[in-house]
Amino acid sequence: MSQNPSFEELVIKPLSQGDLEEMHRIEELVYTDPWTFNLLEQSLKATMTFTIGLAETKTNGICKGYAIYQVIFNEAHLLNIAIHPDIQNRGEGARLLEAVLSDSRRRGADSMYLEVRPSNSSAQKLYEKRGFRCLMVREKYYSNGEAAVIMLCDLKETI
């Protein structure tokens, strides 16, 4: 298998403990303020929290991206999404986000919200293309003092 899998070679699957090391590696490559290994591990065990990822194969494939989200009653919250730098800008983030939205809808969510840094314009564009809109800005949200743009998507309208 090639080091840079093509779109067709990556599958979306639930993630498990065995994916934690690679999730953490991606987290540290992608974010300036990454989640800790323990926080990622807790997200795999937390009630009403779901973790899906992009992997090279359905079984024992290397994780190349992941999304962590919650569905509580009729509301979903995208907590984290990350794509390995080697496969960014190939549509994989959009494909993973679509899987999250679809699964959240299936689990009964009518809407999904998320927080994104104002400096992360590429992520904001991805979310806007998928129907998210800016709801508000929360000042000093991140540990470095940066604000968060709170975005909301009506899942009943984006079918």
Image (spheres, rainbow, N blue to C red):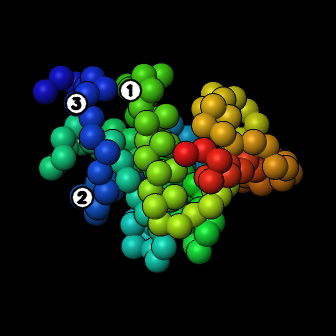
At mark 3, the secondary structure is helix
Q: Residues within 10 Å of mark 1 (few under 14, many from 20)?
A: some
Mark 2 / mark 1, whichever is N-terminal? 2
Q: Residues within 10 Å of mark 3 (few under 14, many from 20)?
A: some
Camera-near label (3 vs 1) is 3
Q: Amino acid under label 3?
A: Glu
Residue 121 location, quadrant:
top right
Quarter of the image holding residue 113? bottom right
- Tell whether 86 sits left or right of 155: left
Task: Look at the numbered discs 3 and 1 and tell me whether their residues touch, using CB distance below 8 Å.
Answer: no
Task: Kindly indicate whether the residue at mark 1 contacts the one at mark 2 (C-beta within 8 angstroms).
Answer: no
Give the residue number, with chain letter if any, for mark 2. Answer: 18
Taking the image as shown, residue 80 lies to the left or right of residue 124, namely left
Residue drawn 29% across the image and 51% down it: 13
Considering the numbered disc 2 on the image, is that residue within a helix, a strand or a loop?
helix
Q: Which residue is mark 1?
A: 87
Q: Can residue 35 be seen at all in this image of the molecule? A: no
- Disc number placed over residue 9 in the picture, else none: 3
> In front here: 74 or 42?
74
What residue is at 47 percent from the left and 51 percent from the top?
Answer: 102
Q: Position of residue 134 (x, y in %)?
A: 79, 43
The answer to whether one can see residue 60 in this image is: yes
Q: Does residue 141 appear left or right of residue 19 in this picture?
A: right
**Nearest to the observer: residue 49 or residue 82:** 49
